[in-house]
Each structure stands twice: as C-alpha cells, then as structure tokens.
Image (cartoon, coloured by chain):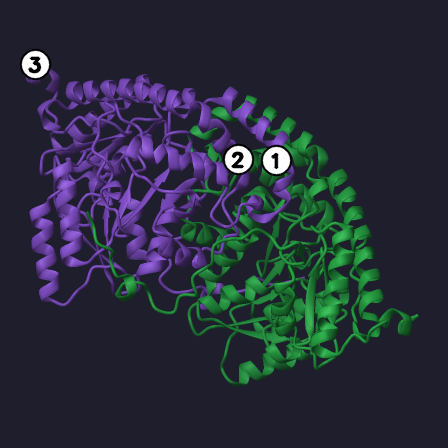
Chain colours: A purple, B green
Amino acid sequence: MSTDLDYSGLIRSGLPAPMPKWQGFPKYNFIGGHNDTNSIPIGDMISAVTNVLEREGASLATYGLQNGPQGYKPLREFIVSKLAQRSGIITNIDNILITSGSGQALDLVNTLLCESGDTVLVEQFSYGSAIARLRKIGVNPIGIPLDNNGIKIDLLESKLIELRKNLIKPKYLYVIPTVQNPGGSIMPEENRRELLRLSREFDFPILEDECYADLLWNSKRPIALAAMDNGNRVIHCGSFSKTIAPALRVGYLVADWHLLSQILAVKNDSGTGALEQMMLAEYCVNHFDDHVNKLSSTLKDKLETLVEAVKVYFGTSAEFEVPEGGIFLWVSLPEHVDTIRLSQLAAKEGIAINPGPEWSTDTKPASSKLRLCFGHPSKKIIEEGVSKLAEICHQEFGVPLRGANRIRS
Amino acid sequence: MSTDLDYSGLIRSGLPAPMPKWQGFPKYNFIGGHNDTNSIPIGDMISAVTNVLEREGASLATYGLQNGPQGYKPLREFIVSKLAQRSGIITNIDNILITSGSGQALDLVNTLLCESGDTVLVEQFSYGSAIARLRKIGVNPIGIPLDNNGIKIDLLESKLIELRKNLIKPKYLYVIPTVQNPGGSIMPEENRRELLRLSREFDFPILEDECYADLLWNSKRPIALAAMDNGNRVIHCGSFSKTIAPALRVGYLVADWHLLSQILAVKNDSGTGALEQMMLAEYCVNHFDDHVNKLSSTLKDKLETLVEAVKVYFGTSAEFEVPEGGIFLWVSLPEHVDTIRLSQLAAKEGIAINPGPEWSTDTKPASSKLRLCFGHPSKKIIEEGVSKLAEICHQEFGVPLRGANRIRS
C-alpha cells in the first residue's frame, strides 16, 4: 500500500554513521567493561530478587516504587554505607541519585553544566565514552597529561592559568583518581589535596568517577575527593557494572542537594529499572563485600596472566605499569606502532583492542598505546589473544622482534 | 576544608526549575501511568526471573547479554509475536529496539529527526511528556484538533497545505490512534488509511504510539498504522509499563532497519536493564494474554466507578466519552472553569489531576478540561477523590451545582 519514504531530507545533520548489524563478540575480546562470566552470583541474585519481590513486588505498580525520582531507598541506603566504608564519603540518601549506568550520570552533569562551545578539563588519557559524550554536545575536552600519580597537578595549574588569561572558564574537571581509566593509577592523597586547592583557586567543580574504585587488590587507598570536600565542589559517580554485572545498568550520582534538585529536573526517564535496583539493594547488603573480594582476586589472577603474556609475546617492546585494581592494562608500544591500524588488522583476526586514540583527548600522544581489558576473556583466551596480537604487530610494524621473550629473559 | 562553590556562573541557562524533595504520592492520585497494585503478578514474576537467571544468569557479565545493542532476543521475539497477534504488524527481531520506556523511544526519534526550530505535528490533545520533550529541544509542536475518531483528517490536510505554502516541512506526525491519550478514542480503519495517504502525499513519517493499545475492553480494533504501511514511513512504539508494571522501564521501538541502524548509533546508554528484559521475556511468553485480559477487566471496573462518581458529583457539568480501554478519562468542564487553578487548589487537598493544558499543544482549547487516571487509586479512593474535587470546583467556580446528581437524575 505504501511506497517508501525518502528520509534523506528529514534525518538530522551531523549524526554518527549508522551502526552495522551486531555480529556477536569477537573471540579475543579485550574491549568493553564486560566481566568474568563465572563470577556472576546467580544463586544469591535469585534469592535476593525472590525476597524483595515477595515483600515489595506490588510497588512495581507505581513509577519510582513509591520511593520518588531519586531511586529505590534501600539501594540509596546501601550506597551511603558503601561510600562511607570504602571511599570515606559521609553523605545521606537525599544526596544520592540512582542512574541508568554511570553513563547517564555523565550525561546529566553535562546537561546541567555544558553548552556547545564550552570547555571541560579531563585527564589526557581517559574514559573514551566520557570524551565522546562531551564532543557529541559540542564541548571541547582539554586533556591534561598524567603520570603514575594520575593527572599532573603542575600542568593542570598552568593550563588553568592559561585559560584564565584567555577568559575561558572550564565548566568542570572530569577525573578518575582511583584506578584511573585507562592508566590504572591511584592518585596519592597529597595530589588530591592539591586538586581541591586548584578547584578553590580557580572556581571549577570536579566530577570524580569511581567506577573501578571498589575493585582493588590492596584495600588501602586514599579517601575520595568527595570525602575531602566538605562543600559542594565535588560531584561523585559510581556504578555496579564493574562490581556486580554490566548488563544491569545501575549507577549513581552523589551531589549536594541543590545541584541534585536541578539535575532531577532534567532527568526525564521516569526512573531507572526497578527490578535491578531492588535486586541489587537486597543482594548487596549481605554479599557486596564478600563478592567484591572474591571478584577482585579472580581479576588479579587474570591480570597476572595478561601481564605474563604481554611480557612473553611483546618482550621489551611493551611498557606498562601493573595496576592495583580494575579490569584493564594500558600498554605503550614503540612510537612507530600505529595502534589504530593495529586494531583494524587485529579485528580481522577476531581480536578486539582499544587503540590509544579512542581513550585520549589527543591522538598523537596515544597513537602507539592500547588498552587491554582482561575481565571477560578466560586465561586461555588472554594468552592466545596476546600471542596472536604480537604476531600481527610484528608482521605490520616489525615489533616485537620474533622471540621477544628470549631477548627479554 | 573546602568553601562552597558558586555554581550560578556555571549552570547552563534555560534549565527547568529545580525539583523539590519528593514528599510521597498524594492520597487521591489521578495522575501518572501508575497501575493497579493488586494486579502485579508477583508469583509468576518470581518464577520467571528464577528460571531465566538459572538458565542464562551468567550472561549478565556482558553488556547486552550477548544479544547486541537492540536488546534481549527472546523479548524481541515476544514483541514480534505480540505485534502480529494484537496489532497486525508483521516484522522481525532485526526491526525491534528495546528501549528504557517509551519515553526513550520518543527521545531517540527526536534525536534522529529533529533540530531546534523544526516543526512536528501532534494531536492537539496529546501525551504531555511527548509535547514537553519536543519543546525542550526547541521543536515547535503544532496541534491538530481531534474528534471521537481521533485526529481530524481534514484539518490535518489543510494544515499540511498551509505548511507547504510556507515552505515548512514537518519532521513527523506523532499520533496515538488506538486508545488516544488523553481522549481514549480509537481511530477507525478508514481514517488510518487517510492518514497514510496524507503521509505519502506530503512526504512525512508517522510515529505511532501504542502504549495503551493492549488494554482494551473489547478486543476488536483496527490494525495499527504500522501494519497498513508495508514500507518505512511508520515508526511504531510501545511499552510494558501499562500492561505489566511502570517501574520496570521497558519499552520498544519498531522501525525499518535503515532507520534503526541510525537510531542505534545515537543510543549511547549501553542497553536497557537486562534483568527486566529477561524477566519480561520469560513471563510474557506464558502469561501476557491472560494477565492483560484480567488487568483490562480490573481497569474497566475502576473506570465504571470513576464514570459513576463523575456523573454523581459533577452531574451535567462534566462531559466525556467513555473510553474503550486505557487508564484515563478526559473530562470537559464548563468553559469558565480554569483547570490549572483547579489542580492547584486540589493539590492542597491531596488530590492530583492533570489540567488540560498539560496535555495539549494549546492552552485555550484545553483550559477547562482535565485528565483523570484511574489505574492506581482504589475504587473507594476514586469515589472519595471525585467527590472532593467536585466540592473544590464548586467552591471556586460555582459548578457543579450542589446536588448536581439530583439535577441530573
């Protein structure tokens, strides 16, 4: 009955390229925040969801479960206790907003603060999606170089002075101080104090992302920036994607109520999925600590496999710092290796990696770096995948030399 | 340690007013898509979520459950069969996108097609959030009047001619043909054919919203616009909020793959909550039809209570069409009644109603109308709430006359 409509004059300009049909994950999948399959606590999840539905299932009949637009209260209560225990943050449920993953938390902060043409400061190597979300809305992300202690305070300060001279006021600083993504560094307490000093001197808020901070091999860590700030200048976010399961899509934002009330006014999604919130609250109260300890040990074991494989197959061609937590290793290859090209060649062999430029504000300093996520692949797949990747890299770029492991030993 | 930051120079201009702290639902809650509390199928939900987690829980370790960005395949398969059976739409899972409620479906279509300054056609009285979403992004929603058969085809056609003369090309028409929100009308098949004819003649796509279409007292209904279009011009959306539970946040979009692939490219939320998708798929395959039949009968019963209460307490002052489905009644009061003022006075007495202008592109034609949702309140609360509302209306506007029921009988 109907002829096709030509959408070419209707579709908005400047959209990203259409997405191809999904073909399944590659065999050697070193990208994305996927987690260890065997670590999903299926039995305890079933008990949790059964208990909570038996007790409160009828409240699913209302938007927000009779708990209002900030999310399920018992989950906010758990987050308050987790933040106090693990991050040193003392807050209350009125300052917590449950979000659909931490990605929505980033979007909400951007909606609150940013317009096209604005400037936001970020670590030069940072979460690819955070950088992409800023660019998508026309914001200019300025990258500040990092070292093993995270963002370089002196370079941040000189950039702030330069911006002030040019009358540019950055809308905020996005920073991942605890298990930096991708570098894995943990910012020392002294540097955190310096960051807050700069925030006061230059009047900018800080968005602190702690998505990976609960996955540490060593439980010692400095308290969060949000814990050192007794005012309103640090907005904090986190997620259950990495500690429990990424498919659940539950994150959270912690902010001063005056900011949160403004953020709530622009959050028009009618709430985050209730079943996930209910299950998580019921599960986490009893099992979070044990689960995270066990998961961290599994991840550490996988990281050791990855580190060993990179040493064996890449030898001295690969440089990296072994992280104290998280699910990724940030590797530097010799300067002439173009990791975008490497990732394209690897994809043909079923190997997915993040080339450095995807995780950087600037292409050049990241052009020979890559991020390898180790949470999801098995140890066997990690070992095989790195071996194959080294072979592809050798064929295209001449490094690592064959027998790199022998040269190294 | 830190002094407060002044955000006044940082927060973006033009944001809506901050949201006050949530104080719980009002006692007489006639707004929102909340549903009947006793109809939540708790036991069957627990069985469903237990079965699916036992079988596939480990897949929660991956974003998208190994099912790709379009959503959990068994849920898409159920939607395909439901659309065929209930709406006459023949499609396949490649053309289905699971969304976080139908609100996200609307946002995605807007992101695909609209820029600030664009024009979109809508029914003059329509879903308040759909109108608000358009305005929020600077789009001009033009309302076309309705009658008991839905949008008036002749007025739509003259508006299209007028727009063409002024070189304005509407980006799409948003329409709710089956259980129109708020009017409750069901558009006859002949009018649907005429709508598609206009779509071809004037080259505009149609976004068909069927969020309420599965809640019918009488199973006979014309097939969906998307079923009459064998091309790409109708984009269709729906939801499980009204048929199963609003707190779950699961909706869907049905579109030609070429459009959907472009929509997928702008959907950057890493997927909709997996536990809800899994539970719904498992539950719906076995229980959807029975549940919806039972729920519809409960809703019809509540509507009868509401209709009776409005007749008794408002008498001849209230005019309405009794809908054949859904969860709301659209009531017209005498012209001098300002329902925005009425809603403010009612709120003080714990009664929440939607004043007409919230559900309309134009204030004036809706100024003495109101929407009463009957899914959530009990029959006792419905009867009491309408009685109190009539009293408030009488005190402020002199109508209904006291003893309106006697006058009417």
Real-space Cα distance between discs 1 and 3? Answer: 61 Å
Q: Residue B224 versus residue A128: which sits nearer the camera?
A: A128
Residue B380 is left or right of residue A57, and the answer is: right
> Residue at 59% of width from left, 25% of height from top?
B50
Across and down, in percent, residue A131 comes to: 27, 50
Q: In the picture shown, does residue A172 fall above or below B311?
A: above
Real-space Cα distance between discs 2 and 1? Answer: 9 Å
Could you tell me the amino acid type at mark 1? Glu
Of the numbered discs 1 and 3, the one sitting upstream in the chain is 1
Q: Are marks 2 and 1 in contact (CB under 8 Å)?
A: yes
Quarter the C terminus of chain A occupies: top left
Could you tell me the amino acid type at mark 2? Met
Across and down, in percent, residue B213 comes to: 70, 54
Q: In the picture shown, does residue A74 fall above or below A292?
A: below
Q: Residue B179 versus residue A156: which sits nearer the camera?
A: A156
Residue A284 is left or right of residue B366, and the answer is: left
Q: Are marks 1 and 3 in contact (CB under 8 Å)?
A: no
The chain under label 2 reads: A
> Residue at 33% of width from left, 43% of height from top?
A237
The chain under label 1 reads: A
Q: Which mark is residue A409?
A: 3
The image quadrant that residue A390 belongs to is: top left
The chain under label 3 reads: A
Residue at disc 1, secondary structure: helix
Residue at disc 3, secondary structure: loop
Of marks 1 and 3, the one in the foreground: 1
Of the numbered discs 2 and 1, the one sitting upstream in the chain is 1
The residue tagged 1 is A56
The residue tagged 2 is A278
